[in-house]
Image (tube, rainbow, N blue to C red):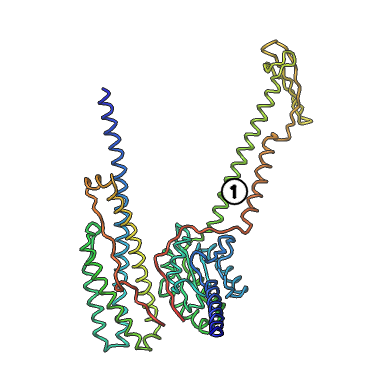
Amino acid sequence: MKTLKSILVAILATMTFTSCTYNKLVEQEETVEQKWADVQTQYQRRADLIPNLVNTVKGYAAHESKTLEAVVEARSKATQITLNADELTPEKLAEYQAAQGEVSQALGRLLAITENYPDLKANEQFSELQAQLEGTENRIAESRRIYNEAVQTYNVSVRRFPNNIWAMIFGFEKKSPFAAEAGAEKAPTVEF
Amino acid sequence: MTIIKGKMTSMRKIVFYIFILIATISMAATYTPDNLPIPYLQDKTQYVSNPDGILSQTAVDSLNLWLGQMETAHGVQTVLAVVEHVEGGDAYDFCMALGRKYKIGSKEQNTGLIILLATGDRSYYILTGRGLEGTLPDAICKRIENRQMLPALREGDWDEAMLNAVRAITKYVDGDDSLVGSSDFEHIGNHVSHFVFSLFLVFGILIIMLAILYDRRKKSYCPSCHQYKMKRISRRTTTNHLLGKRAHHDTYRCTHCHFTKERHWDEDMHHNGGAAAAGGILGSSFFHGGGGFSGGHFGGHFGGGSFGGGGAGGRF
């Protein structure tokens, strides 16, 4: 009788303990997914701005078509890659990051050449578009930072003992943060 | 040789002193989010942080007034800082760090606003909270800067630049009906006064109950056997309508020694019970206290807003 009782207590304790851990992991995974969605929203926002920007620049610098085409091409490539929150493996994230990095670089080159067109720089519409683009780059950086924080919290939970046992049983896997990129992901700096 | 050496040391000394001088000057005028004074925390009517005295007092007063109205009417909580230099020289990074540190803006509406002008760095930034990005999109921030601030900034008229900027921002904020005036602080003031009021009420009731109990005990005292065992066994009441009085004739008997005593008392029918009057006085005095409380200049608090990187800035 006594052993039966203690076994029952042990089972109950384990279950409570497990459900606690499980709920916490679910919660943290949910946060990561939400933050990932925010990151994608901001990248999408940038992609939406590009056609307008390209058209404005075209009006002033039509013969820079190579640079303009590079931006459009990079954009279309990047928008093809979408990642669901449940497939955030290091390889896929790196791929995503590389595609978006291409867009950043192409945009950087485009903004660099606009320096040669005083009329374009004086255009208020262009100035405001540029501000929107900068704001979006800032938002991307901020949402990535927040995403990385959420991933870190989640990964620590998944890997810490004894959570790691339950994580293994219930199939919680480590998620990948954004890797810091040398220059590629920096917001294009524009001198006035 | 010694002369040269002496010259060297004196030169070195001068260089050293110049270095120290430059270091102190630049240290005094370079701000980090941690050492930038936020007067709002001490006095909720002060939104402007002007530690280097770059803006005139007149401009600061006007800005505080306008920003105060913006918070009362639309719940937009602003920190406006005008300094010479910010650490790192990047206005955006500074504003974000400031926003993260103080969590400017209410948690519900998330309408925090940070306006920074670093005259020595020749840079400025308008950073909008997440909830303000719709009212003040990046393009609009840029337009305000281009049209309202830049001409004055190029002339070095800092007062005019900031006044223009806030005037323009106010117009956009006023035009957005979805923004609700939070007056967060007053809410809290009300909560406090409600709390104190109910505390007083509970105390008042407690005192009255204690008084009734004390009265009962006093009445139950038996002068014969000195025990509290007297109980009322009968009451006869006569009413005098002319005088508006009731006369009560109560008979008490001690359950211990059977000592009997008559008690006689008059009740004034024109007045309510004294207890209710006492409660009213307590309540009203406390309400006055509440009024005085919210009238004073108390420190403001930031409500937990967050910044996602919206807004625009530039250099001049």
Q: As rendered, which of B113 and A24 lies closer to the eye?
A: A24
Q: Is residue A4 toward the left or the right of residue B213 in the image?
A: left
Q: Is residue B304 toward the left or the right of residue A164 in the image?
A: right
Which class describes the residues within 10 Å of circle 1: few (<14), some (14-19), or many (20+)? many
Where residue B161 appears, as percent x and y from the top left, is 53, 78
Q: Residue furthest right?
A: B243
Looking at the image, can residue B177 be seen?
Answer: no
Looking at the image, can residue A34 be seen?
Answer: yes
Numbered disc 1: what chain? B
Disc 1 secondary structure class: helix
Can you identify the residue that label 1 sits on? Answer: B193
Q: Residue at the location (54% across, 64% down)?
A: B38
Q: As rendered, which of B173 and A62 lies closer to the eye?
A: A62
Would you place residue B249 above or below residue A124 in this image? Answer: above
Q: Residue at the location (48% across, 66% down)?
A: B33
Q: Residue at the location (32% across, 47% down)?
A: A24
Would you place residue B285 above or below residue B172 in this image? Answer: above
Q: How many marks?
A: 1
Q: Is residue A135 toward the left or the right of residue B70 in the image?
A: left
Where residue A157 appears, as percent x and y from the top left, is 30, 50
Q: As rendered, which of A26 and A55 lies closer to the eye?
A: A26
Q: Residue furthest top?
A: B257
Would you place residue B203 above or below residue A175 in this image? Answer: above
Where residue A112 appears, as percent x and y from the top left, is 33, 83
Where residue A136 appears, as percent x and y from the top left, is 35, 71
Q: Write down the quadrant of residue B199 in the picture.
A: top right
Q: Is residue A74 toward the left or the right of residue A119 in the image?
A: left
Q: Amino acid at mark 1?
A: Ser
Would you place residue B193 above or below residue B98 in this image? Answer: above
